Amino acid sequence: MHTTKIDPAAVRSDWAARGFRADLWIDAPAQVWNDVVHDVDHLTMLLEGNCQIEMDGRAVRVVAGDELMIPAGTRHTVRNVGDGAARWLHGFRDR
C-alpha cells in the first residue's frame, strides 16, 4: 500500500503565501456534503482517506496529497467514499 507523506504545516504556509487560511476538517465514514457553495475561492487537500468531489458535471476521485481549487460560487458535493474517516485541509481565500 502506497502512503503519501504530507506536511500540513508546509501546506498551510504555502496556502498562506497564496492568500488562503487553512483549517483541518474530519469527515466521518459515509459523510456527504450536498450542493455546497462558498462565496470565496476554496482550496482543499485530502490528507487521509478516500473521497469524491462532484462539480461542474463531473466526479473527481481525490487521493491523499491532491489539491483541488473550487472557485467561488461553484456548487459541489463532497463524499467520503472510504471505510474510515477522511482528514482534509480546507482553505478559504482571505477577503
Image (cartoon, rainbow, N blue to C red):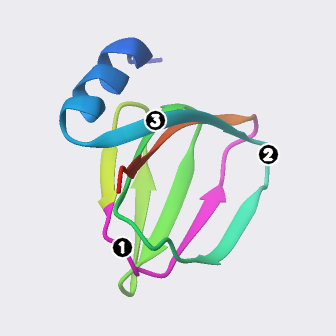
Residue toward you, 77 or 49: 77
Mark linked to residue 22 = 3
Q: Residue at x 43, y 18 (%)?
A: 8
Alpha-carbon distance for marks 1 and 2? Answer: 27 Å
Quarter of the figure with the C terminus? bottom left
Q: Residue at x 55, y 34 (%)?
A: 23
Q: Considering only order in the chain, which callout, 2 or 1, is on the residue closer to the N terminus?
A: 2
Classed neighbour count for the residue bearing mark 2: other residues with Cα under 10 Å, few (<14), some (14–19), many (≥20): some
The correct choice, above or below, for 34 with respect to 46 in the image is below
Q: Considering only order in the chain, which callout, 1 or 3, is on the residue closer to the N terminus?
A: 3
- Residue 75 in the image: state x and y as whole percent: 48, 82
- Residue 18 in the image: state x and y as whole percent: 19, 39
Mark linked to residue 72 = 1
Residue 67: quadrant of the picture: top left
Residue range (magenta): 70-84
* Left or right position of 68 against 34: left
Residue at the disc numbered 2: 29
- Residue 78 in the image: state x and y as whole percent: 59, 63
Identity, as a three-letter code, of the amino acid under mark 2: Pro
Query: Going by the picture, which residue comes out furthest to the left?
Result: 18
Identity, as a three-letter code, of the amino acid under mark 1: Ala
Is 37 one of the magenta-colored residues?
Answer: no
Classed neighbour count for the residue bearing mark 1: other residues with Cα under 10 Å, few (<14), some (14–19), many (≥20): some
